[in-house]
Image (cartoon, rainbow, N blue to C red):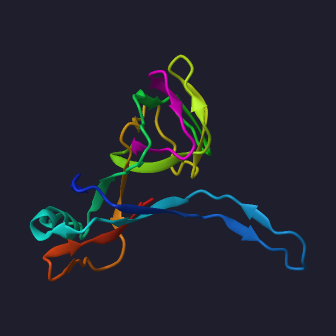
């Protein structure tokens, strides 16, 4: 079961980290290093919430405490960036792999480098980032460069969330903690790591 984390208050800080599976190959007898980009890189997000009164933090504490064996779902904020109206983007064509993604179903739209989006495959979300600006022509966007590489091949017409991307993953670590200070405010921070 996926546990949707509260929408309010929004995180005051998120630190994304790309957990890379790349391989650096160093020649045994000297020479230049070769870097191989490999399948399986994924995202991890360190999340810090603003100080909250205890009564306002209760929903967050309950959701985080409930995520013992379940994944959590968090809206990814993109402060200062207006995603606009992307339409209803879908994967255009089955069998896609690698760092390029063909999409359709867009309104007139330009995806911006650094913008987050999520793919929903098999009921699970996978976060990606646009690698360079790309404009949809006649509702289609061919060869959108993304990071990291696709971890699974999406089916044709897989839903793509540009308007409100979300990260889904497990809470990292074995304990859920929070602080309550003398001013009765609660401090919460946690890490979400994609499961695949």
Which region is colored magenta?
103-120
Residue closest to the eye, 127 or 188: 188
Residue closest to the eye, 80 or 142: 80
Q: Which secondary structure is most common in the magenta stretch?
A: strand
The percent position of residue 5, horizontal first and vertical second, equals: 24, 57
Could you say which quadrant of the image residue 164 lies in?
Answer: top left
| Residue found at x 31% / y 71% | 189
Residue 116 part of the magenta-drawn span: yes
| Residue found at x 38% / y 36% | 163
The percent position of residue 15, horizontal first and vertical second, equals: 45, 64
* The furthest residue to the top: 138
Residue closest to the eye, 61 or 146: 61
Q: Is residue 1 above or below residue 133?
A: below
Could you say which quadrant of the image residue 8 lies in?
Answer: bottom left
Quarter of the rendering occupied by the C terminus:
bottom left
Could you say which quadrant of the image residue 121 lies in?
Answer: top left
| Residue found at x 59% / y 32% | 134
Using residue 121 as the reference point, say whether residue 101 is left or right of it. Answer: right
Using residue 31 as the reference point, say whether residue 147 is left or right of it. Answer: left
The percent position of residue 77, horizontal first and vertical second, equals: 37, 50
The percent position of residue 131, horizontal first and vertical second, equals: 60, 45
């Amino acid at each position: 079961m996926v546990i949707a984390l509260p929408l309010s208050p929004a995180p005051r800080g998120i630190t994304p980290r790309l957990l890379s599976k790349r391989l650096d190959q160093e020649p045994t007898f000297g020479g230049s290093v070769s870097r191989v980009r490999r399948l399986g890189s994924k995202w991890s997000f360190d999340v810090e919430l603003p100080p909250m009164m205890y009564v306002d933090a209760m929903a967050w504490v309950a959701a985080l405490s409930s995520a013992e064996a379940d994944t959590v779902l968090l809206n990814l904020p993109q402060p200062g960036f207006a995603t606009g109206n992307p339409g209803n983007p879908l994967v255009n064509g089955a069998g896609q792999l690698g760092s390029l993604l063909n999409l359709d179903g867009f309104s007139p739209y330009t995806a911006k480098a650094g913008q987050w989006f999520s793919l929903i495959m098999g009921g699970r979300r996978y976060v990606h980032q646009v690698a360079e600006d790309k404009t949809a022509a006649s509702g289609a966007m061919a060869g959108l460069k993304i990071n990291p590489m696709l971890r699974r091949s999406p089916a044709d017409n897989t839903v793509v969330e540009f308007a409100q991307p979300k990260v889904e993953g497990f809470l990292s670590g074995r304990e859920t903690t929070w602080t309550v200070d003398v001013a009765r405010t609660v401090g919460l921070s946690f890490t979400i790591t994609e499961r695949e």
